[in-house]
Amino acid sequence: MLNIKNLHVSLEEEDKQILKGVDLTVEAGKVHAIMGPNGSGKSTLSYVLSGKDGYEVTEGSAELLGEDLLDIDPEERAALGLFLAFQYPVEIPGVGNMTFLRTAVNSQRKARGEDEMSATEFLKVVRERAKSLKIDADMLKRPVNVGFSGGEKKRNEILQMAMLEPKMCILDETDSGLDVDAMKLVAEGVNALRSEGRGFLVITHYQRLLDHIKPDVVHIMANGRIVKTGGPELALEVEQNGYADILAEVA
Amino acid sequence: MSALQAKIDATEERIAAHDMPQGGWSMAARSEALARLRSMGLPSRRDEYWKYTRPDTLTQVGATNAAVLATDEAPVFGEIDTLQIVFVDGVFDEAASADLTLEGITIERLAAANADIHWAKGLYGALETNGQTPVERPLATLNTAFATDGVLLHITGKPSKPIHLIYRHVSNTSDAILHHVIKVDADAEVTVLENGPAAARFNECMEVDIADGAKFHHVRAQGRDHERRAATHIFARLGTESTFKSFTLTANGVMTRNECVIELTGDDAHATIAGASLGDGDFHHDDTVFITHDAVNCESRQVFKKVLRNGATGVFQGKILVKAGAQKTDGYQISQSLLLDEDSQFLAKPELEIYADDVACSHGSTSGAIDEDALFYLRSRGVPHGEATDMLTLSFLAEAVEEIENEALAEEINERLAAWLARRRS
């Protein structure tokens, strides 16, 4: 599904290298988690994969379903099946959430040469999927993320994911700013989307999200590289001993 | 030659180019306006009030050539049931207009109302004259003196549909001067719509007298003809618990100066003046507003948004004057521009002058580009760059459009905004 090879990335504005050779493969149907201390490059990886400006790839490659991701625009990556759930979803005043969702869904369909979803069909599907995420009609009508609580914003991200039906989902610290109940709700939403044809990359600081979204593989990232890979037990190890031990071990 | 002499000469030259309509109740006001015009002179670049906008094409004798836009686009407000009154290059078109009768309102034309006694006699030129202090607005005075037509609307009830002034532009050199007088009686309510470029050059003056408890709604679209020029004035006086709401869409137009002078004279009155303008290339758009609070517990809102690209220029001069005793005034003023490139500019002069001590006035003026984070967010969801930029541009304009109370009218405006953006994308 997602193949990252020897990825090196610098900031465009300053001569600072953030990723220093990341190798990662996420298979369809699997959930991979990336954990790591602050500044290890986790969020940068998610931004580079989704196509945010300001980063320069100096070496290496990233492919989704065999297509070179790094060479195409963010909207093309999305149409190809990549989705990033933002750590800080952006507020867009004046654009209704529903309009935004429908534009996104139909833009992707159009890009893939598929028929657009009719207004009625769209409404039916969005209501059904919003309901399971406890997103009410009012939240759908309001401008995108404007005045949403932290939990509402993250639920809205998952709703977008559910509507766009991506093949590869990246969740960037989706647990940040969430209380236990909100985290459970978000995790349930993610789990409902787990399927054989879909890969997940869950980026998180803490193990607690992984109690709810059970990973198949856990990677530890530090200083721009993946330094250790293991099973779910690796996350527990981090929870108990912190990163220091692991980093000392691989140093 | 001194600047003063040049001004006098230019003014006299312009005056000589017009014929004053003769006879009837408006003669006194017209003659008096002519005298006032002579004493103040037409604006020149040296006048402080015209620092950001060159008045020459508005003051010169005759209109500069302006091509007529050929379009098969459905007219604005076409989906709405209205009473249509059509002017072609400033000349009333009876065949194209509706029967001017509707319950709750009397509709007459300025050019056709020639009796010696008329309700509009006390208003024609009166609000315009009031609006000349502390800042002179000679183009409005020129209008009072020489207007060839316009509508006289006396609203006594709640007419069932909006009064819709349609301004067609068919001649490349037409120079139109229209003057409207609108009197809204106590507790009456009316919506006035205007659309179209009107002429190669359009000088419009609208005087609106809103009695206690009355409501006046106004939505205007100034047409898409790129080369047309316009100088418009709205003078409004508000009584106790009355409402004035006006919104203007300006998409294209090589020169537009929209002035609005509002006086809140009765307690608990509300005035909103809003505008969305879109300029591409050779586009100069100036919103000049003066709001006077002269009563207790009144609210005023000024909301102006401009989208500028390819060297377009936007101007905002907005002032709130709160007179002594106008306590509990709530004045809000925002003027913002979205600059789509580095060649465009926005010049803003927000002013507050407050002589009461218990007031809440806020003002803000900003210039900015498209928010890159929001753009990336939309693109990451699959919305292509051009469409995402349009969505964010509409989002920027939304605050102004939301000032339109009627949803169907707001929707008409939104469709025009989206179409304007879409045309520039293809």
Image: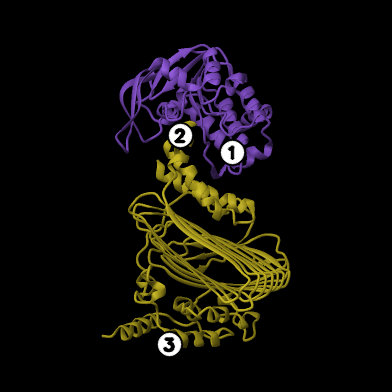
Quickly name the residue at label 3: B39
Q: Mark yes or no: residue A130 visible.
A: no
Residue type at mark 2 is Arg
Q: SS for tag 1?
A: helix
* Residue A102 percent location from the top left of the image: 56, 33
Few, some or many residues within 10 Å of mark 1 (<14, 14–19, 20+): many
Q: Are marks 2 and 1 on the same chain?
A: no
In the picture provided, is B81 more to the left or to the right than A24? Answer: right
Mark 2 to mark 3 CA distance (whole Å):
59 Å
Residue A113 is situated, as x and y percent measured from the top left of the image, at 47, 24
**Residue B273 versus residue B337: which sits nearer the camera?**
B337
3D distance between C-alphas at marks 2 and 1: 15 Å
Q: Which chain is purple?
A: A
Image quadrant where residue B83 sits: bottom right
The chain holding disc 1 is: A
Pointer 2 indicates a residue of which chain? B
Q: Which of the numbered marks, if any, corresponds to residue A170?
A: none
Point out the frontmost of discs 3 and 1: 1
Q: How many marks?
A: 3
- Tell me the number on the disc at residue A97: 1
Q: Is residue B400 above or below residue B115?
A: above
> Which of the chains is yellow?
B
Residue tagged 2? B379
**In the image, what residue type sits under mark 3?**
Ser
